[in-house]
Amino acid sequence: MNREAPLGVFDSGLGGLTVVRALRAALPHEDIIYLGDTARVPYGTKGPATVLRYALACTRALVDRGVKSIVIACNTVSAVAPDRLRADFDIPVLSVIEPSARAAIRAAGDGRIGVLGTAATIASGAYVRAVCANSTRCEVVGHAAPLLVPLAEEGWLEGEVPTLVVRHYLQPFVGRGIGAVVLGCTHYPLFRPLIEEQVRAMLGPHVPIVDSALATADETRAFLVARDLTTTRKRAGQLEFLVTDEPRAFEAVAQRFLGDTAPKATIIDL
Amino acid sequence: MNREAPLGVFDSGLGGLTVVRALRAALPHEDIIYLGDTARVPYGTKGPATVLRYALACTRALVDRGVKSIVIACNTVSAVAPDRLRADFDIPVLSVIEPSARAAIRAAGDGRIGVLGTAATIASGAYVRAVCANSTRCEVVGHAAPLLVPLAEEGWLEGEVPTLVVRHYLQPFVGRGIGAVVLGCTHYPLFRPLIEEQVRAMLGPHVPIVDSALATADETRAFLVARDLTTTRKRAGQLEFLVTDEPRAFEAVAQRFLGDTAPKATIIDL
């Protein structure tokens, strides 16, 4: 594996840019190619066979561009596809769920782990499996929060409607002894201030939030360092964006997710 | 054209089932093949070239199954694809926008026509063009109402959140002299009671709602009768459902849209 090659990061759409943002903070010298499958977004409402088919196509496109490692910046894909991607491609594949589960176990103490995710992520049971594989103690309570994805994509991040929607999705956690809440979808960090406020109000003042984007960036850095796969360059890493739908409104929305000016995106066909 | 052949109806997902429901009331003896492109839903947030590509694939799948006519049960597809579908396929293609525009002109009297639709439908200007082609008088005010699609697909049809969302989207129509409101997306009729209530409260007691599903069914019946394309059979028409994502939760959601028990769906690859 060429340590100077870029990292390949993909997601169903733009949510994975929260992972790119965290990766750039953790690994500022790495080049990144980001692929957003914006023509077929969202994945989280779809079935596992369909999600796997799309994940294979995204990974193939990035591998063909010579990336040194794949970061799946999507909880839904991480819930159904990593084993198959590792079997089919001769390249390291990092998912968001394993790092998030480990961070949640550390954060939850004696409490249960509450996971908010897409319908597909919750239905897969992937968080329950990842927590059980890393701890003998923690219990997981998962709930689907599907409306947060379109709200984030529309940029409707504050006010009465997002507040009511967040409260609606946190309600099943009330009185369940939740010790940490996992934002188990890469769109959800956009609602972090609102979710923190409502978690404090509804679940108690000291329940930490686990952000799957940050947890994944931390483990990706540790992984690259351990394998001597970090770049030796000292310049700022470059970003390249690929999308499958027309890049029209891409720049504006990407900026919201990335917290920074986004470069132009190139459309590709999968 | 064989008058005993089924009608082919397609949509990005399940919203078009409101058109199927209206077609079955207007044409109870016709067989219908419905194709929902559930693996790539929604179309309304995507660009015109992507939507056209998907529309061509859906139409090809229905034409290959021997349908006598295509009904585009999706405003977004109707906004960008009918001319190209008519050019590429030797079969009548009916859209939802032309019938809805004509119904809106009749309903609006001296008032402006307010259109709620997806981002793609509103951005296309298709309602403005269709109204101008059919009237020298009416003005069109269009606003995107994107959150109503995921709310409908989740079945979150009443209560505080849908009410606030509907009010948010009707707000730009207040004080604009609106004479009729078009539900310019086949998902929106699911919110009809709520939208009627809020239109009464916000725009006045006598502003009619134009349902693109009902307008399309009426014109489809008139079209088939005028061309001698109605079936001569007198038994109840049969329904066949094709989807592109796994049919998992299809039956439950289809029932909500169809107002009736839905048959099993078959998965196809486009």
Image (cartoon, coloured by chain):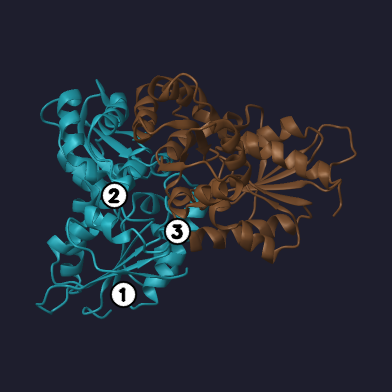
Chain colours: A brown, B cyan
- Say which residue label 1 marks: B67
Q: Residues within 10 Å of mark 1 (few under 14, many from 20)?
A: many
Q: Chain of mark 2?
A: B
> How far apart are the alpha carbons under marks 3 and 1?
28 Å
Question: Mark 3 or 2, which is nearer the eye?
Answer: 3
> How far apart are the alpha carbons under marks 3 and 2?
23 Å
- Say which residue label 3 marks: A47
Label 2 or label 1, whichever comes before in sequence order: 1
Question: Mark 3 or 1, which is nearer the eye?
Answer: 3
Q: Chain of mark 1?
A: B
- Say which residue label 2 marks: B186
The reply, left or right, for residue A184 in relation to residue B23 is right
Same chain, marks 2 and 1? yes
Q: Can you say whether A163 is above or below B46 in the image?
A: above
The reply, left or right, for residue A104 in relation to residue A155 is right
User: Can you give x and y, in whole percent of width and height, for residue B249 in the image?
Assistant: 33, 58
* Residue A12 visible from this viewpoint: no
The reply, left or right, for residue B46 in relation to residue B25 is right
User: Can you give x and y, in whole percent of width and height, for residue B247 in the image?
Assistant: 36, 64
User: Can you give x and y, in whole percent of width and height, for residue A235 in the image?
Assistant: 86, 32
Q: Which corner quadrant of the image does residue B248 belong to?
A: bottom left
Callout 3 amino acid: Gly
Q: Residues within 10 Å of mark 2 (few under 14, many from 20)?
A: many
Callout 1 amino acid: Val
- Secondary structure under the numbered disc 2 in the rendered image: loop
At 15% across and 31% down in the image, what residue appears? B197
Q: Chain of mark 3?
A: A
Q: Residues within 10 Å of mark 3 (few under 14, many from 20)?
A: many
Callout 2 amino acid: Thr
